[in-house]
Amino acid sequence: MDLKNIINEFSQDDLIYVFLPIFFAALLIEWIYSRRYRPELFEIGDTKASIWMMLLVGVVDLAPKFLAFIALVYLADLSPLRDIVRRQWWAWVLLFLLDDFIYYWFHRLNHQVRLFWAGHVSHHSAIRMNFATALRQGVGERLHKYLFWLPLPLLGFDPLMILTVMAWNLFYQYWLHTELIGRLPTWFEWIFNTPSHHRVHHASNIRYLDCNHGGMLIIWDRLFGSFSKEVATEKPVYGLTTNITSLRPIDVATHEYRAILSDVHRATSWSDKLRYLFLAPGWSHDGEDKRSKVLRSKVLRSNSDSNTDEVAG
């Protein structure tokens, strides 16, 4: 396929133009409702930062997405399955499952590899949970995101089909960013990602940190040990464990990259410098280890010791 045909096919990835009016209409309705009944749902500076980040991502994402599409086209041409896997109903179902599985690992690694986290953290820097937060996407993660989806065309799926399923996955996730929907039916909560599960994902509470990475399905978190249920006794506290103090778009997008550079410069050995890049956020070569798994294990040990003391007493 020549470049002209690639550009023509890439231009057909236009679902975002359908989704955006729906997103903004829902955001407006949520904002009007909150002004009367739940004024704490929005904070003006936080919301402005989210809108700015949406605009910034829209600009930054164009080049990586187009380059990824070219790679998808050429990889699809190499696939021995390209004449077998077309747009049959079963191919859409299979692609939906594979796309969501890939999204889970992409999203989980964004939380477990600090260099990736630096590109994703802006989404979690919002201190409110509302539809504006859904628009506050990570800028830096656009640079590595599409690499995770490159195996799919080798399985015979065509590039436009892949981008379409990715778009519908993100459309579904928009509706997860709200406090206005409580718990859904048990069977639905067990299989699908829901607002309750996603409130956990955005929480900075130790029990909730780095949990519930699924896109449309929550079964991956249940299978791979990263699931946490939202409990009534511990309300999610949104934002970062240490919130940023500036809401300027450039600071929201780059503050963690600057923190990494500072830590790498401070480290004295090359092995520690690399650990700051590739270990989870919170690791330190000369201070307290504040990675989520370490913090959670300390809480569990503390609770265990307290229970032991109570029994002994």
Image: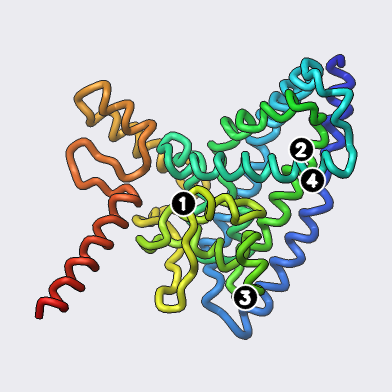
Residue at 61%, 32% in the rendered image: 148
**Percent from the top left, x then y, of residue 158?**
82, 29
**Quadrant containing the C terminus in the rendered view:** bottom left
Residue annotated with mark 1: 225
* Quadrant position of residue 257: top left
Position above or below: 191 against 213: below
Q: Position of residue 161 (x, y in %)?
A: 82, 36
Kind of residue at badge 2: Leu
Query: Does the CB distance between marks 2 and 3 fall below 8 Å?
Result: no
Q: Which residue is mark 2?
A: 163
Horizontal side, residue 145 vs residue 22: left or right: left
Q: Earlier in the sequence, mark 1 or mark 3?
A: 3
Q: Residues within 10 Å of mark 3 (few under 14, many from 20)?
A: some
Secondary structure under tag 2 reads helix
Q: Identify which residue is drawn at 90% across, 39% down.
A: 88
Q: Earlier in the sequence, mark 4 or mark 3?
A: 4
